[in-house]
Image: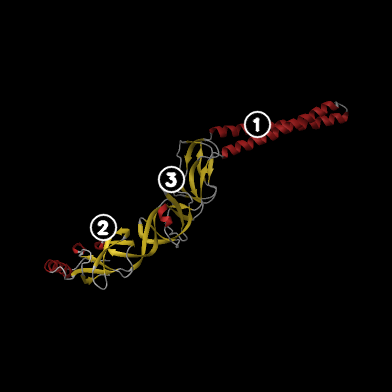
Amino acid sequence: MFRLAPPALLAALLSGAAALAQSPDAPLAVEIVVAHAEIQTRDYSLTGELRARDSVGAAFPIAGQIAEMRVEQGQKVAAGMVLARMESVQQQQALRAAEAGLGTAEADHRQAMEDLRRAETLLARGATTRAARDAAEDKVQITAGAYAQALADLDRARKALSDTDLTAPADATVTERMAEVGQVVGAAEPVLQLALSGGIDAVFDVPEVLLTMPSGDKKLRLSRLSDPDKGFDGLIHEVSPLVDAMTGTVAVTVRIPAPPPDLTFGEAVRGTTTIAESAKIVLPYTALSATTDGPAVWTVDATSGAVSLTPVVVERYETGQIVLRDGIEDGDRIVTRGAQLLYPGRVVRAVEVTQ
């Protein structure tokens, strides 16, 4: 961290300026630093959302109007628990009709069986004809088919009535209510989102440019927005191969091996990663000058003390300092304060060296 020039340095610069006015050849007192390449580390933070690792949309298999919603968002449910109900007047009427039809078919089949036994007894005594006995047997076959059809109709009616109840497929947590009482929904249209397991992942929309930066560490530091001081670990699990055309971001899924017990689905979290860059030369912002071609700094010849204006390529500007990509070598001596009094070839002397 570079500090402001102390009063002694300011006094030296003022005295140097006075000396310049009196003796142009006298070395000018300036502040000089020696350039050293330093490895730069930067922290990048983004806000993501907690989501269930395994989730499913719960939907009615038939279309209709919702009559009852029995669960709220965030509620834990057990396997087989009724989550919602649909209006079932038609299904109940169909079930009663199917039960009545089954009773009629069963009675007809039972009567046909009695008629067949009576016909066989009469045929054995010679009191009826074989044609009458065969007709009775045909009637048994017909009523047996009708009975089987009535059983199928009853099973179908029971299934249709049970389809008006939406039940939990397994132990889960309700993460979202997508429909309300009175709403008409279509068949297989999700009305609830369920988290089927306790696993929690964090999903971040990461700008594409960040994914091009070198970073071999897949570990992230996560924290809740409501409690940033308590952190926990996350591991990058999946990076989407697609870039969102609207936002230019990529969905990155971060797995949380040991989530805190009070985390909830849908909660916002902050993820932070540290990226180490290659060694770069960092100078205080006061060292920056300019030429007609762009940024430059004043370098000092180690033997003569004469300065020259050296073009540089700036990697980026930061608070109080600049990071250089090219133009300066490790060990070069750079003028930081007093550069406004310089011209090529001017001899200078160091008043204070600040690292």
Q: How is colour applied across the structure in the image?
A: secondary structure
Of pointers 1 and 2, the one earlier in the residue sequence: 1
Q: Amino acid at mark 1?
A: Gly
Residue corresponding to mark 3: 245
Foreground label between 1 and 2 = 2
Relative to 125, is 219 on the left or the right?
A: left
Residue corresponding to mark 1: 101
Q: Amino acid at mark 3?
A: Ala
Is residue 207 visible in the rendered structure shown here?
A: no
Quarter of the image where one finds residue 346: bottom left
Query: What whole-number distance in Å separates the C-alpha atoms at marks 3 and 2?
Result: 40 Å
Q: Is residue 52 above or below residue 183?
A: below
Relative to 130, is 88 on the left or the right?
A: left
How many numbered markers are drawn?
3
Residue 287: where, in percent of width, then height? 25, 63
Q: Secondary structure at mark 2?
A: strand
Quarter of the image where one finds residue 95: top right
105 vs 214, nearest the viewer: 214
Q: Secondary structure at mark 1?
A: helix
37 vs 177, nearest the viewer: 37
Residue extending farthest left: 22
Of pointers 3 and 2, the one earlier in the residue sequence: 3
Q: Is residue 282 above or below residue 70?
A: below
Residue corresponding to mark 2: 291
Residue 319: where, in percent of width, then height? 28, 60
Q: Amino acid at mark 2?
A: Thr
Query: What whole-number distance in Å separates the C-alpha atoms at marks 1 and 2?
Result: 99 Å
Foreground label between 3 and 1 = 3
The crowd level at tag 2 (other Cα within 10 Å; few <14, some 14-19, many 20+) is few
